Amino acid sequence: MSTSEIEATVRAELNRLRESIDNIDAAVVHMLAERFKATQQVGRLKADHKLPPADPARETRQIARLRELAQSANLDPAFAEKLLNFIIAEVIRHHERIAEEAENGAGA
């Protein structure tokens, strides 16, 4: 194989891999959107029943669960925990906003 043929083969493989990554990224975004739809419903339910926005015991269980899943998937558990902590913080922020809106009568 000539250098140009190797380069073309490498470029084709790189493009194939990048298309796969792009598809996975799209799936991740859609899954996160679905997750946030569900957590919005949780936030409204919590606000309706005057429950706190955060649930530290559940968060601890979820982090442990996600770390185990990451380990079994050969993903760095520390990375998975950081990702979940970021998501949890965003969910709590949403729940606080929902609770505030419900308290002010804007949630209906």
Image (spheres, rainbow, N blue to C red):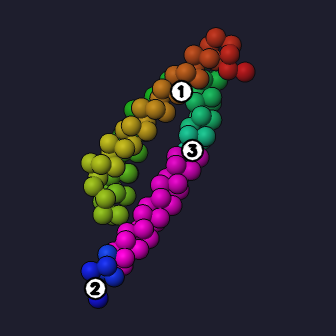
Q: State the residue position of label 3.
A: 33
- Which picture quadrant has residue 63? top left
Name the chief secondary structure element in magenta.
Answer: helix
Residue type, mark 2 in image: Ser
Please state if 14 lies on the left or on the right of 24 as rendered. Answer: left
Task: Give the x, y percent position of residue 52.
Answer: 50, 23
Q: What residue is pinned by disc 2?
A: 2
Which residue is pictured at 42% across the width and 32% down the height?
Answer: 89
Give amino acid for label 3: Ala
Residue at 64% x, 23% y is: 48
Circle 2 crowding by C-alpha within 10 Å: few under 14, some 14–19, many from 20: few
Magenta residues?
8-34
Rendered image: mark on residue 95 = 1
Say what secondary structure mark 2 lies in.
loop
Query: In the shown orientation, is residue 64 left or right of residue 30?
Result: left
Name which residue lies at 56% across and 50% down.
Answer: 30
Closer to the camera, 74 or 56?
74
SS type, badge 1: helix
Q: Are marks 2 and 3 in contact (CB under 8 Å)?
A: no
Q: Earlier in the sequence, mark 2 or mark 3?
A: 2
Tell me the SS state at disc 3: helix
- Seen from the viewer's position, the closer of residues 54 and 22 is 22
Q: Is residue 24 visible?
A: no
Q: Identify which residue, 44 or 84, lies in the foreground.
A: 84
Q: Does the CB distance between marks 1 and 3 fall below 8 Å?
A: no
Three-letter amino acid code of the residue under disc 1: His
Name the mark on residue 35: none
Q: Quadrant of the N terminus?
A: bottom left
